[in-house]
Image (cartoon, grey):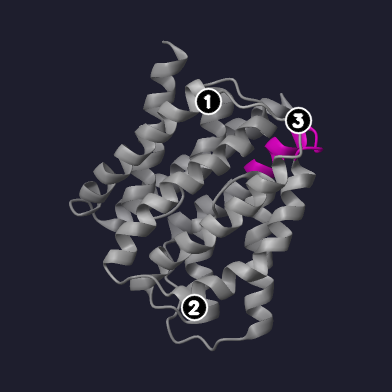
């Protein structure tokens, strides 16, 4: 199977995850870029930032038109993560590939478990500025270091920390993700990481199209079922990546 076909198939899978769950697609993009398309961990995390920005911006437009974006809350949360995202973006390019792979696997495990448990955060949480700063900085660091958008972290954080209703949390998280990813990507322009645009562009195109199919799928499949399937997939990906490094 050619690399182009693999890029299209992987992009479609990432898009389905993004469209049906509103988050989590980018955490599939990195292992797909590494194991299917032969990218190094540094190249994959950088390319993932590009994919995250384009697909999240496309989805943000749709959520904004529906009035499901809390701009002030999102910008406040994003502001706390901008400097950590930039610092982590620069640091990531100097980290050994095995460390990046293991760090990514370590992040995917709790993310997968969260998806399997399906715990919905309370919507009546009290807003605390220190908690906003800590949560925003943590998400920015994760985005910059591992090249993932962190929607699976941003959505519950926005609900619990900023008391954003679940109905608006996904759309608002996209704003946070785009801001962090842009800063992290800008920080990486100073590093010597080359990207294969001949594969990245088809990957992005398939992701955007897959996201629309994912939205239609979400209307037909129970959210809990989709979330648990995705959680199991994340755990499988994390196990495979860790085993690849250890063995």
Label placed on residue 72: 2
Q: Quadrant of the N terminus?
A: top left
Visible in this render: residue 235? Answer: no
Distance from disc 2 to disc 1, alpha carbons, whole Å, reads 35 Å
Mark 3 nearby-residue class (10 Å; few <14, some 14–19, many ≥20): few
Give the secondary structure at mark 1: helix
- Quadrant containing the C terminus in the rendered view: top right
Report which residue position mark 3 lands on. 192
Residue found at x 39% / y 64%: 171
Q: Say which quarter of the image contains residue 95.
A: top right
Few, some or many C-alpha atoms within 10 Å of disc 1 (few <14, some 14-19, many ≥20)?
few
Q: Position of residue 246 (x, y in %)?
A: 73, 29
Q: Which mark is residue 197?
A: 1
Residue drawn at 64 percent across, 45 percent down: 185
Residue 54 appears at what percent x and percent y? 45, 45
Q: Secondary structure at mark 3?
A: loop
Q: In the image, what residue occupies the spot 50% across and 85% down?
A: 125
The image shows residue 178 at horizontal and vertical percentages of: 52, 55
- Nearer-the-camera pick, 137 or 98: 137
Q: Which residues are magenta?
A: 93-105
């Amino acid at each position: 199977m050619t690399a182009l076909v693999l890029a299209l198939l992987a992009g479609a899978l990432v898009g389905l995850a993004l469209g049906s769950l509103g988050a989590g697609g980018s955490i599939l993009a990195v292992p797909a870029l590494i194991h299917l398309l032969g990218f190094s961990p540094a190249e994959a995390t950088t390319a993932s930032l590009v994919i995250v920005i384009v697909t999240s911006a496309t989805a943000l437009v749709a959520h904004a038109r529906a009035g499901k974006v809390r701009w002030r809350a999102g910008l406040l949360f994003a502001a706390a993560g901008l400097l950590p995202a930039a610092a982590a973006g620069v640091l990531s390019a100097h980290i050994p590939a095995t460390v990046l792979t293991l760090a990514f696997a370590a992040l995917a495990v709790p993310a997968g478990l969260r998806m399997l448990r399906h715990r919905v955060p309370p919507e009546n949480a009290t807003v605390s500025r220190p908690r906003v700063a800590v949560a925003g900085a943590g998400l920015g660091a994760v985005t910059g270091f591992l090249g993932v958008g962190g929607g699976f972290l941003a959505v519950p954080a926005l609900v619990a920390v900023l008391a954003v209703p679940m109905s608006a949390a996904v759309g608002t998280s996209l704003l946070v993700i785009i801001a962090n990813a842009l800063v992290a990507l800008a920080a990486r322009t100073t590093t010597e990481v080359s990207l294969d645009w001949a594969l990245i562009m088809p990957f992005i195109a398939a992701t955007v199209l897959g996201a629309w199919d994912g939205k239609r799928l979400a209307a037909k499949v129970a959210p809990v079922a989709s979330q648990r399937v995705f959680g199991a997939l994340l755990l499988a990906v994390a196990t495979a990546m860790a085993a690849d490094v250890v063995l």
